[in-house]
Amino acid sequence: MEKFISFFEDSRSFYLIKTDMLGRYTYVNQFFKDKFGHISSNFIGTDISNTVYEEDLHKCNETVIKCVQNPGRVYSTLIRKPAPDQTFYWTYWEFQCITNDLDEAQEIICFGTDFTELIKHSDIIRQYAFQTAHHIRKPISEISRLLKEIKEKNIGQEDESVYKME
């Protein structure tokens, strides 16, 4: 497990954090420090609520409860974190409860990544799809209306394929 964790210590793509059972940071990797340094210069000992968008704190708490109830199992959630410009970053996290030799919950380890750009792009794609659908809906409706009118007037009866839109 330690070799696995050491891989993420120097990651430039993934956050690695550990908290005690009271929700205070006991470790954060350099990538986390660099990204969220506008919040604190030293995270160790501070509560996670300082780095989680207020409306998402319940997600963290619920995920930790699941982890403690099922040590060793991984649970995931999307959490917003404050950005320097008063907006927020969308982050995806996987949580796991680490136990001691007596199987008592010792700490929570979390791996995270920033999904902000992906979510922004998906919103742009969704908006484009909506606008495109709006622009083509009227011509398609008009074509359908004309085909129906042609069929009703029995124009072009000799060629039934005119009525089929396949």
Image (cartoon, grey):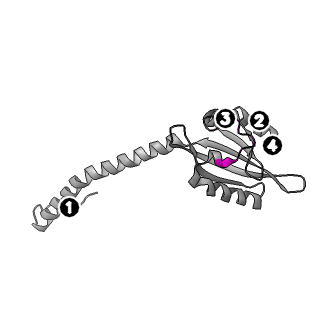
| Other residues around mark 4 within 10 Å, as few (<14) / some (14–19) / many (≥20) | few
The residue indicated by pointer 2 is 6
Q: Quadrant of residue 141?
A: bottom left
State if disc 3 and disc 1 touch (CB < 8 Å).
no
State whether residue 122 is above or below residue 151: above
State whether residue 50 is above or below residue 105: above
Kindly report the distance in space between the C-alpha atoms of the residues bearing marks 3 and 2. Answer: 16 Å
Kindly report the distance in space between the C-alpha atoms of the residues bearing marks 2 and 4. Answer: 9 Å
Task: Identify the mark nearer the N-term, 2 or 4.
Answer: 4
Number of labels in the image equals 4
Q: Secondary structure at mark 4?
A: loop
Image quarter in which the C terminus is found: bottom left
* Residue extent of the magenta highlight: 40-49
Q: Amino acid at mark 4?
A: Met
Task: Identify the mark nearer the N-term, 1 or 3.
Answer: 3
State whether residue 16 is above or below residue 161: above
Residue 1, numbered label: 4
Kindly report the distance in space between the C-alpha atoms of the residues bearing marks 1 and 3. Answer: 64 Å
Q: Quadrant of residue 58?
A: bottom right
The residue indicated by pointer 1 is 163
| Residue pictured at 51% horizontal, 41% vertical | 86
The foreground one among 74 and 84 is: 84
Q: Main secondary structure of the magenta part?
A: loop
Q: Is residue 61 visible?
A: yes
Q: Is residue 157 visible?
A: no
| Residue pictured at 71% horizontal, 39% vertical | 43
Kindly report the distance in space between the C-alpha atoms of the residues bearing marks 1 and 2. Answer: 66 Å
Percent from the top left, x then y, of residue 116? 52, 42
The residue indicated by pointer 3 is 33
